[in-house]
Amino acid sequence: MSLAFVPPTVEEFIYRPIWTLHLGFIDLPVTFPIIVMFAVTLFFGAFMFRAFRQPKLVPVGAQNVAEAGIDFIQSQIVLPVLGPEGASWTPFLTTMFFWVFFNNIIAIVPGVQFPATSRMALPALLAGMSWVIYNYIGIREQGFGGYFKGILFPPGVPKPIYILLTPIEFLSTIIFRPLTLAIRLFANMVAGHFLLLVWFLGATVFFQSGIGKITFLLPFGFGVVFTAFEVFVAGMQAFIITILTAVYIAGASHPEH
Amino acid sequence: MLALVGFLAEISGSFAPIGKGLVYGLGAIGPGIGIGIIFGKAIEAMARQPEAAGLIRPVMFLGFALVEALALFGFVLFFIVPSK
């Protein structure tokens, strides 16, 4: 028996297109992560539809679970960050949280075990959406001039400092915000998937080796522990991308004093 | 000692893999310190005023996320830096 341990590479995240949709002059290759994403979306949509098809005053079953989820977003994100006047953001933020959460948690569902959010397209889409929304809200609430004056020339700063501050503020608010939002989610899920791959591939190698099969229990045990850690990371990252979007919206809707 | 010198002399080829490793290693130093400060201060704050724990926790995770992004830049750069 050979002890060849092949470390996982980026190749693990690249899937061949299963079939290609031809839409006029655009080709849309459909790959495994896309199918996972649509399956998750369909599942989430079906669950929510079932929960609120005939809403009852005293919730039972699916409605109970869904209302607990919405209540969590309302009490942990919307009220502390956006305040009572931001209650209209609850549907959007709830959808965002649970969509990201289910796309993350699919990484440890047996049979799939691939986080759809570890493909940059999904985090980039979410970050782009968040960017468009908070800039639109900022311009709508404060006016074009007022919004960019608030970003680029924050009040209460000595005049010469603006030479240094304005480029930094522009970069951080307009360019780095969506970039970090996307990379945070993407890199966390890629790193988590790598971690699990390393532990379980290691366990396989130890199990196939001649030297005491029982040694495979060590990497396998760590793999189990990190699987539990991945559940935490999945919820955490979904929470963070949602609360950051809420924070950006809140920051854009009120001028700085 | 001589054996080590001989071994080092024998190392030939690209140092890019070492550089790749260093990108993440160096990138994790600052965020490591930062995350330590954030959680330490949050624990301090919660210990001083346990009734404010609910108020502190979301802010703590927010700061954690913002600092952690820097470490993750290093992680992403690991894949961007060419290995040859």
Image (tube, rainbow, N blue to C red):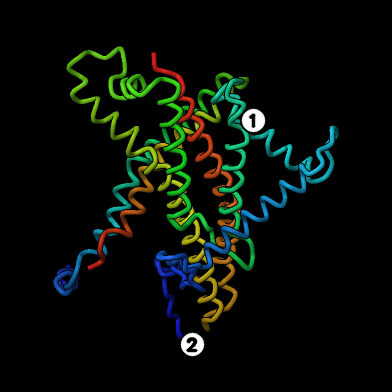
Quadrant of res B11:
bottom left
Furthest-front residue in this view? A24
Whether residue A108 is situated above or below residue A6 in the rendered picture? above
Quadrant containing the C terminus of chain A in the rendered view:
top left
Q: Which chain carries label 1?
A: A
Q: How far apart are marks 2 and 1 (CA)?
A: 56 Å
Judge from the rendering whether residue B43 lies leftward or rightward of residue A135; answer left or right.
right
Tell me where residue A84 appears, x and y as whole percent. 61, 20
Q: Mark 2 lies on which chain?
A: A
Circles 2, 1 touching at the beta carbon (< 8 Å): no
Front residue of A213 and A191? A191
Within 10 Å of disc 2 (Cα), the crowding (few <14, some 14-19, many 20+) is few
Whether residue A242 is situated above or below residue A121 in the rendered picture? above
For the residue labelled by badge 1, is the local secondary structure a helix, a strand or a loop?
Answer: helix
Within 10 Å of disc 1 (Cα), the crowding (few <14, some 14-19, many 20+) is many
Quadrant of res A149:
top left
Residue type (three-letter) at the residue carrying disc 1:
Gln
For the point 78% across and 44% down, the residue is A53
Front residue of A77 and B66? A77
Quadrant of res A159:
top left
What residue would you read off at disc 2? A1
For the residue labelled by badge 2, is the local secondary structure a helix, a strand or a loop?
Answer: loop
Q: If you read the primary sequence from the N terminus, does the residue marked by circle 2 or circle 1 appear first?
A: 2
Front residue of A55 and B47? A55
Tell me where residue A237 appears, x and y as whole percent. 52, 44
Closest to the camera, between mark 2 and mark 1, is 1
Furthest-bottom residue in this view? A1
The circle on residue A74 is: 1
Tell me where residue A211 appears, x and y as whole percent. 52, 80
Residue type (three-letter) at the residue carrying disc 2:
Met
Task: Same chain for labels 2 and 1? Say yes or no.
Answer: yes
Judge from the rendering whether residue B70 lies leftward or rightward of residue A163; answer left or right.
right
